[in-house]
Image (cartoon, rainbow, N blue to C red):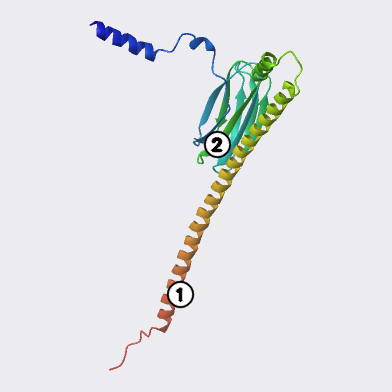
Amino acid sequence: MMAASAALALALWLLLPPVGVGGAGPPPIQDGEFTFLLPAGRKQCFYQSAPANASLETEYQVIGGAGLDVDFTLESPQGVLLVSESRKADGVHTVEPTEAGDYKLCFDNSFSTISEKLVFFELIFDSLQDDEEVEGWAEAVEPEEMLDVKMEDIKESIETMKTRLERSIQMLTLLRAFEARDRNLQEGNLERVNFWSAVNVAVLLLVAVLQVCTLKRFFQDKRPVPT
């Protein structure tokens, strides 16, 4: 009995998180991208948490479907309508500074009764808290005496590199979205070309058969043969 109790206590100790982990604060907000299929006549909304006093950049693009357009709205955590667009193929919007809470992004395809849409969107955060943390780290590490290489120069170089890498990732993601949209258009055009080519071939064959039958009728002699 004592052994079973000890084993149960050891299992609970291994499964439960250590003290202090739950109070470490919420995890940092990360950039994200998502591609989904929006059915015809439907509206779909997404909720994204955002910290206070940050920058939120929202970018969307319709990469598939007839017309390549969709209605888009963006609401603040307080329910204030920030962006409202109708029948757009793409768009880029920036909210700065942000409010703490959940932002609501809605894509509406209710105006279309037949065609579904393939939509890609991306959320990019630029929090000011990261800069404050870097400054605090630099002050803690920097010694009192003057250094040959200043920490400020190193910090500026790192920030510049980080900004350029993030912009490169954004451009690559956008290029992938453009490539997906162009591929969908080309595949749709190929299907239409193949369909109408098959229809034309079938019509040509039918016309050829009718012409042959008509010519045979012209040369048929239906007069009775005298015996």
Q: Position of residue 40 (x, y in %)?
A: 50, 37
Q: Position of residue 86 (x, y in %)?
A: 63, 33
Foreground residue, 95 or 192?
Answer: 95
Foreground residue, 200 or 170?
Answer: 170
Q: Amino acid at mark 1?
A: Gln
Query: Would residue 219 appear left or right of 91 to someone viewing this image?
Result: left
Residue plotted at (75% across, 15% down): 145
Residue marked by disc 1: 211
Give the quadrant of residue 17: top left
Q: Which label was assigned to residue 119?
A: 2
Q: Position of residue 217 (x, y in %)?
A: 40, 79
Give the mark, 2 or 1, whose residue is nearer the N terminus. Answer: 2
Q: Which label was assigned to residue 136?
A: none
Label 1, residues with CA under 10 Å away: few <14, some 14-19, many ≥20 = few
- Let me know if residue 112 appears in the view: no
> Mark 1: which secondary structure?
helix
> Which of the image's four quarters has the C terminus?
bottom left
Q: Is residue 161 above or below residue 115?
A: above
Give the quadrant of residue 206: bottom left
Q: Is residue 187 above or below residue 128?
A: below
Give the CA separation, mark 2 to mark 1: 51 Å
Residue plotted at (59% across, 31% down): 122
Q: How many marks?
A: 2
- Let me know if residue 157 appears in the view: yes
Q: Is residue 186 above or below residue 158?
A: below
> Which of the image's four quarters has the N terminus?
top left
Q: Position of residue 222 (x, y in %)?
A: 36, 84
> Mark 2: which secondary structure?
strand
Give the quadrant of residue 12: top left
